[in-house]
Amino acid sequence: MFQRRWSFGLGTVFSLIVVYFIFLYSRDKGWGALAFASKWYLIIAGILIALPIAILLIVLIVMLLLFLISMFKMHSLNRVRKKQKTKDYVDAEYQIK
């Protein structure tokens, strides 16, 4: 019942470093096909690694903005309530003759 999932670990980072040096070496030697293949491997693997991180950052930023907006609304609501409580009221009694 063991199910293997997509995961990026130390081996992925190591392979990206190795492929980057292969890309630099093949570009220096003029091997176009190897340089092209290694460049696209770096692009695709970089996107697959950066995409979850970007999604996480976007979610955190949206949560922070919502929290700040709600705190601002609560602060302004408390300020309105304090103004309503501190209004001057005139307590007057009158009689109809």
Image: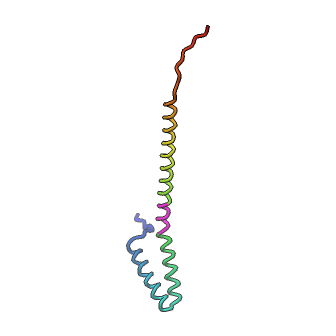
Relative side of 15 to 84, left or right? left
- The image shows residue 74 at horizontal and vertical percentages of 49, 42
Q: In this view, does 35 lie above or below 52?
A: below
72 versus 52 height, above or below: above
Q: Position of residue 96 (x, y in %)?
A: 61, 10
Extreme left residue here? 10
Q: Which colour scheme is used?
A: rainbow
Work out which quarter of the rendered image holds the C terminus and state it.
top right
67 w.r.t. 17: above or below:
above
Question: Which residue is depicted at the point 52% across and 20% down?
Answer: 91
Q: Residue at the location (58% across, 11% down)?
A: 95
Which residue corresponds to the image point at 50% horizontal and 62% vertical from the top-left? 55
Magenta part of the chain: 50-57
Query: Residue 3 or 97: which is nearer the viewer?
Result: 97
Q: Looking at this rendering, what residue extends furthest in the top direction?
A: 97
The image position of residue 24, as x and y in percent, is: 46, 85
Taking the view exactly as shown, the residue that stands out farthest to the bottom is 29
The N terminus lies in which quarter of the figure?
Answer: bottom left
Specify the principal SS of the magenta part. helix
State whether residue 79 is above or below residue 38: above
